[in-house]
Amino acid sequence: MGLLLNAQAKQNICPDINILLNVPVEASIERLKKRGIPLTNFEKRGEKYFEKIREGFLDQAKNDPEHWVIVNGEKDEKKINKEVIRILKERKLI
């Protein structure tokens, strides 16, 4: 069902690349708390909910490596930025 809904939402449009910043759910929530950002009702749905979403994105990335790249989102922002730029240059997208 999820893949069908995703296909309908994309309306047969496929981006050149999807970069998935992979961060464990616990780490994402901790980042929000450290920044003093209050959790919204959406974010309060709990770790199990977000882990399911995360796994869905990881599955998409693993099943379509031509269009998806997984980047470790736990790294320093500058390292992530350099890695994303390197990936885009390798694929001749910039």
Image (tube, grey):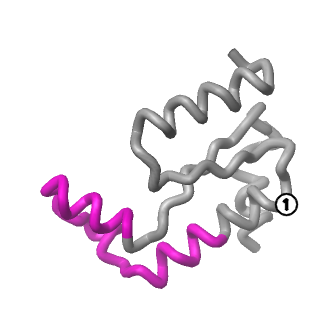
Task: State the residue in front, 89 or 36.
Answer: 89
Q: Position of residue 38 (x, y in %)?
A: 17, 61
Residue 88 x %, y %:
69, 26
Please indicate whether residue 56 sits to the left or right of residue 82 in the image: right
User: In which quadrant will I find the C terminus?
Assistant: top right
Q: Is residue 34 left or right of residue 65?
A: left
Q: Quadrant of the N terminus?
A: bottom right
88 vs 48, nearest the viewer: 88
**Side of 68 where 38 appears, left or right:** left
Asked which quadrant contains residue 92, the reply is: top right
Above or below, comparing residue 28 to residue 21 in the picture: below
Indicate whether 69 appears above or below 87: below
Q: Where is mark 1, residue-wise?
A: 63
**Over which residues does the magenta segment extend?**
27-55
Q: Is residue 45 magenta?
A: yes
Q: Amino acid at mark 1?
A: Asn
Residue for point 72% across, 57% down: 6
Image location of residue 93, percent across then percent down: 74, 20
Most extreme residue toward the top is 94
| Residue drawn at (64%, 43%) of the image | 19
Q: Quadrant of residue 31?
A: bottom left
